[in-house]
Image: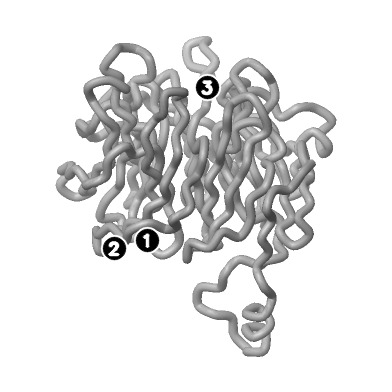
Amino acid sequence: MKIKNLLIIGMAALLVAGCHGTEPENPGPDPLAPILLLNNGNWNSNDACMTIFDMGSGSVSSDVFSRANGRKLGDLAQDIARCGEDYVVSMNGSQLVYLLGSDYKVKREIKAEHEGVRLSPRCLAVQEGRIYVSYYEGYLGEIDPLHDYALRLTPVGPNPDGIACVGGRIYVANSGGYLSPDYGNTVSVVDLEIFSEVAVVTVNNNPVSVVASESGAAVYVCSWGNYADRPSALQRLDTGSLEVTDLSYDNVRGIAAGRGDVLYVVTGSYDENWSITGIINSYDMKTDRPQGRLTDMPIPSYYSISADESGLVFAGSSDYTTEGDMYIFSEEGELLARTGSGGLNPIRGMLVQ
C-alpha cells in the first residue's frame, strides 16, 4: 500500500526531554508510536476495517482485526473508544458492540434488543468504567463490564447520534435521521444515577455531535441542518441553565475534543459533486473564544475529524469509492503525516496504547 507524502517528526526534542528525570506536564506524542485507524466502510458491504499506521517506518498494516480473529470486522464501524486496556468498537450495520483486547482479538460481543428488535449502535463514551452507547432506534445504553456486561436501556429522542458525559449526566444529540424533512432538533439530558431522561433541550436541526468542556460548564453541539433552508450550526449548551447560544461558525461539518480544552471545528461548503474541502479551526472551551485555524492546509474530500489525549488530530478524507486518506496533525497544526487509511471512509484515529 502506498504511503503518500509521509512526514516524520524529528527525534531531537524527544532526546532532550529524555535527559530529564521527570516527564513534561503535557508530553507530545511519541513520533515512533503506531496509530490505529478505524475505517467506516460502506453500507451493507461488510468492509469496515482497522489499520495500524507506523509513523516511524511509514508502514501500513491493514485489516488487523481480520488477521487477529480470522473474520471480517463487519458492516459500518461507527466509533471506537478505550475502556481500560481494551478497545470498544460500535458496529452500526452489524448491530453489535465489540470489546477487543490490546491484541485486537474479540473478548466480547454485546448485542442489544428492545421488544424483539435488534438495536443499531452509533456513538460511544466511557465513564467510570462503564460504556455508554447511543442506539439509533431511540435509546441510550449502559454496558457494565464489572457486572458481566449487563446492559440497561433508556429511551431518548429519535435517532440519537453523538453523546458526551459530564457532571453525572449524558447529553445525547437526537438527529431525527430521515424521519421527517425537518430532522430532529433536540438534545436529551440523561441522569446517570437514575439512568433516565431528565430534560430535553431544543437546538438546531439535525444535531449529530456533542463535546463537553473539561470544566463541565458547557457542551458544544454540532448540527448539520436540513441541507436546504436550515444551515448547519455550532451551539453552546450551558449545562447549568440549559440555555443554548449560537456560535459564529458557518458551514460546520464536524467537531472533536482536543487536549487542553480545545475544540476542533471543521468548516467547509459542498461543491457541485457534494464534496467538502474542510478547514480545521480551533476554539478554546475554557475562555469560549475562537482561536483561528489550526492549519491553513485544506482537507480535500473531507470526511471526518477526531483527536485523542496524546494531542494528535486526525482528519479523514474520502471519495466513498476508493481507499481514504488520513491527515495527522500535531496540536500546534503541524502536518505529521498523510497516509492511506487501508480502507474506505476513515472515521477515527488514535495513538495505540
Q: Secondary structure at mark 2?
A: loop
Residue farthest along the front direction in this orientation:
272
Name the residue carrying label 3.
120
Q: Secondary structure at mark 1?
A: loop
The image shows residue 252 at horizontal and vertical percentages of 34, 39
Circle 3 crowding by C-alpha within 10 Å: few under 14, some 14–19, many from 20: many
Q: Find residue 66 and name its label.
A: none
Give the Cα separation between the discs numbered 1 and 2. Answer: 6 Å
Taking the spot 76% from the left edge, 36% from the top edge, the residue there is: 63
Circle 2 crowding by C-alpha within 10 Å: few under 14, some 14–19, many from 20: some
Q: Mark 1 or mark 2: name the one nearer the start of the chain.
A: 1
Task: Say if mark 1 contacts mark 2, CB within 8 Å.
Answer: yes
The image shows residue 202 at horizontal and vertical percentages of 20, 31
Question: Foreground residue, 51 or 71?
Answer: 51
Circle 1 crowding by C-alpha within 10 Å: few under 14, some 14–19, many from 20: some
Taking the spot 80% from the left edge, 27% from the top edge, the residue there is: 71
Seen in the image, is 101 located left or right of residue 135?
Answer: right
Quadrant for the N terminus, please: top right
The amino acid type of the residue labelled 3 equals Ser
The amino acid type of the residue labelled 1 equals Asp
Q: From the viewer's perspective, is the residue at label 3 or at label 1 nearer?
A: 1
Taking the spot 30% from the left edge, 55% from the top edge, the residue there is: 216
Q: From the viewer's perspective, is the residue at label 2 or at label 3 nearer?
A: 2
Q: Find residue 261 and name its label.
A: 1
Give the Cα separation between the discs numbered 3 and 1. Answer: 31 Å
Name the residue carrying label 2.
286
Q: Is residue 110 above or below residue 101?
A: above
Can residue 193 be seen in the rendering of this structure? no
Q: Mark 3 or mark 1: name the one nearer the start of the chain.
A: 3
The image shows residue 44 at horizontal and vertical percentages of 63, 15
